[in-house]
Image (spheres, rainbow, N blue to C red):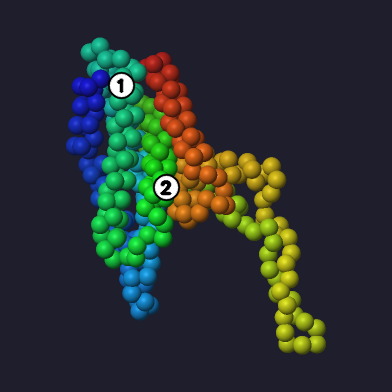
């Protein structure tokens, strides 16, 4: 197992796509920091925006490039015959799959670490202190990191279903985009208020009065509870909630963490089961 991990980490660190992804994550953090700083500087109000405006925004860029890296690494190992060579050398299928999971999760954690490190150094230097206590920021970061680990386990599982690198890339990226789109729809639906204000002119005057009426887009009852559960289940929806640092609208972080751990364990178990029966090229 140790030698398999060493070999897979060697493949990761010599992979140009991994380093390009790290550079992309760093560039995205620098862009968001600079954009927030210059936008506020133009208003003449000084360092107004808190660090929390950008601190929890790393999941979207890191999730996308992690899909690329995981699909590339797993797909490459199956397309170039490496798995067949390892099987011939006596390596177990379960150990090989677990190595894939560990390396892919580590890649996601390293890319997230680059963003967080830049946020804690450069971001903290040009922005106001966070709007949340340090304990809350650490707690929310742990929720996001567990969600990223679950996402990496999903990518590893999906990439292991095929023996073609290009198809693995398409499947992982497609799955990430679908999750992002569904999460955005769910979060926006749950943000709708039960009542909306409407403006009505007062007859015979130039005044207006404000009245409330039911919002037809509001989701309630069983549908609302189902949407909340899906928002807490999908890692991308978890990130959208945490980026607003307000959990009062939807679920709670403990449930998110439980879901992430279950997803990671479930995808890994299913992946090992299928990988044991798969024919390697």
Q: Nearer the viewer, mark 2 or mark 1?
A: 2
Q: Pointer 1: what residue?
A: 96
Q: How many marks?
A: 2
> Looking at the image, which is closer to me, 123 or 23?
123
Identify the residue at the far right of this view.
204
Q: At 42% across and 50% down in the image, what residue appears? A: 136
Task: Judge whether 79 appears above or below 240 on screen.
Answer: above
In this image, 208 relative to 153: left or right?
Answer: right
Q: In the displayed orientation, state which residue is furthest to the bottom.
A: 205
Q: Secondary structure at mark 1?
A: helix
User: Residue 100: x, y in percent?
Assistant: 32, 28
On the question of residue 265 being in view, the answer is yes
Q: Nearer the viewer, residue 220 or 46?
A: 46
Choose top left, top right, bottom left or bottom right for residue 14.
top left
Q: Which residue is mark 2?
A: 140
- Residue 132 at x, y percent in the picture: 41, 57
Give me the residue at 22% from left, 42% from top. 16
* Residue at figure coordinates x 38%, y 36% from the top left: 149
How dense is the environment of label 2, judged by Cα within 10 Å: few (below 14), some, or many (20 and up)? Answer: some
In the rendered image, which quarter contains the N terminus? top left
28 sits left or right of 181 in the view:
left
Question: Could you tell me which secondary element the residue under label 2 belongs to?
Answer: helix
Q: Quadrant of the C terminus?
A: top left
Estimate the x, y position of residue 245 in percent, counting from the top left. 47, 54
Marks 2 and 1, the one that precedes in the sequence: 1
Mark 1 surroundings: few (<14), some (14-19) or many (≥20) residues within 10 A: many
Q: Is residue 198 above or below residue 236?
A: below
Disc 2 and disc 1: Cα gap in Å? 32 Å
Expressed as whole percent of the image width and height from the top left, the position of residue 185 reads 56, 50
Report if the CB atoms under discs 2 and 1 are less than 8 Å apart: no
């Amino acid at each position: 197992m140790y030698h398999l991990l060493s070999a897979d980490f060697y493949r990761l660190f010599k992979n140009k796509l991994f380093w390009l992804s790290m550079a992309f994550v760093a560039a995205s953090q620098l862009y968001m920091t600079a954009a927030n700083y210059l936008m506020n500087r133009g208003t003449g109000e000084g360092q107004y925006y808190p660090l929390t405006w950008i601190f929890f925004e790393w999941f979207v860029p890191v999730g996308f490039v992690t899909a690329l890296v995981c699909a590339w690494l797993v797909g490459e190992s199956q397309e170039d015959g490496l798995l067949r060579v390892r099987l011939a050398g006596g390596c177990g299928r379960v150990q090989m799959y677990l190595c894939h999971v560990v390396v892919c999760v580590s890649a996601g954690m390293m890319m997230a670490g680059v963003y967080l490190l830049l946020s804690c150094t450069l971001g903290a230097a040009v922005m106001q202190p966070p709007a949340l206590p340090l304990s809350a920021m650490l707690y929310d970061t742990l929720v996001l990191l567990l969600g990223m680990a679950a996402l990496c386990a999903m990518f590893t599982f999906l990439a292991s279903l095929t023996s073609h690198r290009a198809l693995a890339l398409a499947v992982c990226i497609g799955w990430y985009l679908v999750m992002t789109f569904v999460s955005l729809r769910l979060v926006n639906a749950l943000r709708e208020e039960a009542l909306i204000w409407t403006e009505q002119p007062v007859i015979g005057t130039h005044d207006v009065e404000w009245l409330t009426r039911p919002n037809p887009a509001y989701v309630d009852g069983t549908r609302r509870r189902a949407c909340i559960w899906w928002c807490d289940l999908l890692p991308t929806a978890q990130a959208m909630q945490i980026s607003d640092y307000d959990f009062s609208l939807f679920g709670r972080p403990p449930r998110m963490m439980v879901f992430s751990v279950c997803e990671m364990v479930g995808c890994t178990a299913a992946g090992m089961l299928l990988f044991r029966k798969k024919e390697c090229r």
